Every structure is written in C-alpha cells, then in structure tokens.
Amino acid sequence: MFSIGEFSRLGSVSARGLAMHPAEQLAAERTRGHLKLAEQLRCARRLRTLRRARRTELRAERRLITAWRRAAELRDAAEPASWYVPD
C-alpha cells in the first residue's frame, strides 16, 4: 500500500485511517488554538487576580498605618488631660 518513505511523510495518523481529512485537520487545529487561547486567558486572569489582591492588601496596610497614627494622636491628646488635676 505505502512504502516506508511515504508513510513517514504522512505525519499525524488518526484512529480511523492513515491521515486526517482536511476538515478534521482544520477542526483539530482550531481546537488546539482554542485550548492555547484558554490557557493564556487563564494565566492572564490569575495575574489580574493577584494584582488586584496585592492592591487591596496595600490599601489595607495604608489604612492600618493611618489608623495607628490617628490612635497615637488621640492618645497623645488625651494624656495631658488625664494629668490635669484642677485645684
């Protein structure tokens, strides 16, 4: 049927026959393309989620620092009043 040289040139072999039909090849390539795109989108979504989480974390840290400073200011403002004893 085929010589060894001809068989090696066929490349991919399907389960139904020796070579895929052009429509099947096109569908397989399209599927591979969709899978590759899905993987890239998955990575991009992960990165976007990580960046969003990092921004949220930084925002929370800034708020915490602001709250600590405000608490220290209020403590400092309250201390002289606690030492004040009217005559």
Image (cartoon, grey):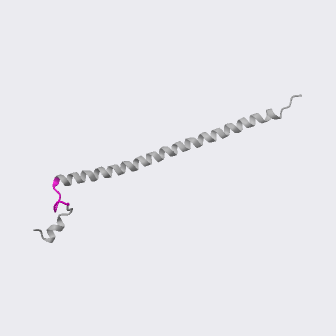
Task: Specify the farthest residue to the front.
Answer: 16
Q: Where is residue 56 in the image (x, y as percent from the top left)?
A: 52, 42
- Quadrant location of the N terminus in the rendered image: bottom left
Observer-nearest of 17 and 83: 17
Task: Specify the farthest residue to the top.
Answer: 87
Residue depicted at 20% across the width and 61% down the height = 15
For residue 44, side relative to residue 80 (left or right)? left
Observer-nearest of 70 and 26: 26
Residue depicted at 59% across the width and 41% down the height = 62
Q: In this view, does 57 lie above or below 7?
A: above
How many numbered callouts? 0
Specify whether residue 56 is painted magenta: no
Q: Position of residue 72 (x, y in %)?
A: 71, 39
Most frequent secondary structure within the magenta stretch = loop
Q: Where is residue 86 in the image (x, y as percent from the top left)?
A: 86, 28
For residue 73, side relative to residue 11 (left or right)? right
Specify whether residue 16 is painted magenta: yes
Task: Specify the farthest residue to the right.
Answer: 87
The stretch in magenta equals 14-22
Q: Position of residue 84 (x, y in %)?
A: 83, 32
Residue depicted at 31% across the width and 51% down the height = 35
Task: Specify the farthest residue to the left.
Answer: 1
- Quadrant location of the C terminus in the rendered image: top right
Q: In which quarter of the image is residue 80?
A: top right
Q: Is residue 46 above or below residue 72?
A: below
Q: In which quarter of the image is residue 2?
A: bottom left
